[in-house]
Image: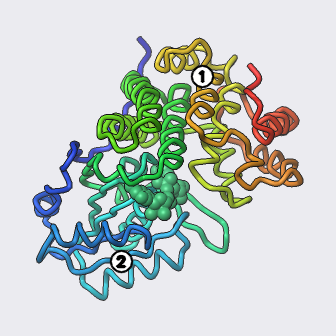
Amino acid sequence: MEDFVFNAQAARVVFGAGSLQKVSHEAGLLQMQRVLVLATPEQAEQAQHVADLLGDKAVGIHAKAVMHVPIETARAGCDEVRRLNADGVIAMGGGSTTGLAKAIALETGLPILAIPTTYAGSEVTSIYGLTDQGVKKTGKDPRVLPRTVIYDPELSLTLPVSLSITSGMNAMAHAAEGLYAQDRNPMTRLMAIEGIAALGKALPLIRLHPNHIEGRSLALYGAWLCGSVLGSVGMALHHKLCHTLGGSFNLPHAEVHTVVLPHALAFNALAAPSAMQDIANALGVGNAPQGLFQLAKDNGAPVALKDIGMKAADLDHAADLAVQSPYWNPKPIGPAQRDEIRTLLQYAYEGVAPNC
Ligand code: NAD
């Protein structure tokens, strides 16, 4: 066995249908007595429900989270925390809301209790992002890691099927890249395989029975595991491409991950054969990139960048950006791979099956 280092992300996880009812108890365990509940405007009602459950422990609701945490949104959140003299924040929502909570924690040091309602996985990472004048910068800081995560599958029953599928594919991307990460280890491998297998089973169930708790529970369990992989090891080409496409061309986060994943894996397939085998086995298919492409397609998710707002005229620029700064990938990336990346993007743009 090879030597390894495993960085556990020490969060308390409370999992189960109906576990939201424990929110006041869990906030108390974190010594939170004056909590600000965060959400997007669309989830203000769910935030109000959390505040009601908290009773005297809630000092307000701040339903102003938006995608990619613009710096102005982060500042407004910090101002609200100071105005209300809050001693903790609860993030009730997807990655955008958790992102706002992280920005507040980074500035104020306040603890976060996260209640995720998508499968993005941000709640179990110490990665934060902030967007200033259209440029998103990410960083890592232990202060932004939520202390407690309440996973209540009942809360994801309202997540539209289309977003459930793409969000689930987004989660699987963390695990897939984790399997060939430079700093991978036996623990992250176990989590990745189990997470991919859970989501591979959950997504068709959600499409068929969006209101059944079974598929929702399995998906949230998979999302936790896949997010934990993202929190523990480094990512590579796939995440770099999605960051570039999402940030520079303003494409929707989960959809971009869904479209790009099969093609990024095909690019890396020969350089990471055991990761491909693990993914294929977890999904019960013969070929990992094609299995993921089919999973997305069969469940009605977008498979073409042209269908989610990408313009053909921007593909050249996207390929240039993807090879501009060096980063680790199982198959090395640099200016010499620019044309290969451009071809990958063309496949993803057109929505044809991955080339492997
Ligand atoms: P999101 O949080 O932007 O949510 C998308 C929409 O769905 C929002 O309108 C939201 O209110 C709504 N929604 C969420 N849950 C719902 C539910 N259960 N029912 C009904 N509507 C619901 O989307 P996301 O994909 O979860 O997050 C994307 C963001 O998270 C991106 O900015 C991404 O960069 C970030 N992210 C960060 C990390 C990290 O580790 N830092 C990891 C993954 C994603």
Q: Secondary structure at mark 1?
A: helix
Could you give the CA–CA distance between mark 1 and mark 2, rounded to whole angstroms?
Answer: 41 Å
Which residue is the site of mark 2? 62
> What is the image's colouring?
rainbow
Q: How many marks?
A: 2
Asked if residue 139 can be seen in this view, the reply is no
Characterize the local packing of mark 2: few (<14), some (14-19) or many (20 or more) Cα atoms within 10 angstroms: many
Residue 321 visible, this orientation: yes
Q: Secondary structure at mark 2?
A: strand
Please provide percent x and percent y for residue 31.
13, 65
Residue 291's disc is: 1
Mark 1 residue CB less than 8 A from any atom of ligand 1: no
Q: Is residue 333 above or below residue 211?
A: above
Q: Quadrant of the rendered structure where residue 36 is?
A: bottom left
Which kind of residue does numbered mark 1 sit on?
Gly
> Is 175 left, or right, of 210 in this rendering?
right
Quadrant containing the C terminus in the rendered view: top right
Which label sits in the foreground, 1 or 2?
Answer: 1
Report whether 131 appears left or right of 327: left
Q: Residue at x 19, y 49 (%)?
A: 18
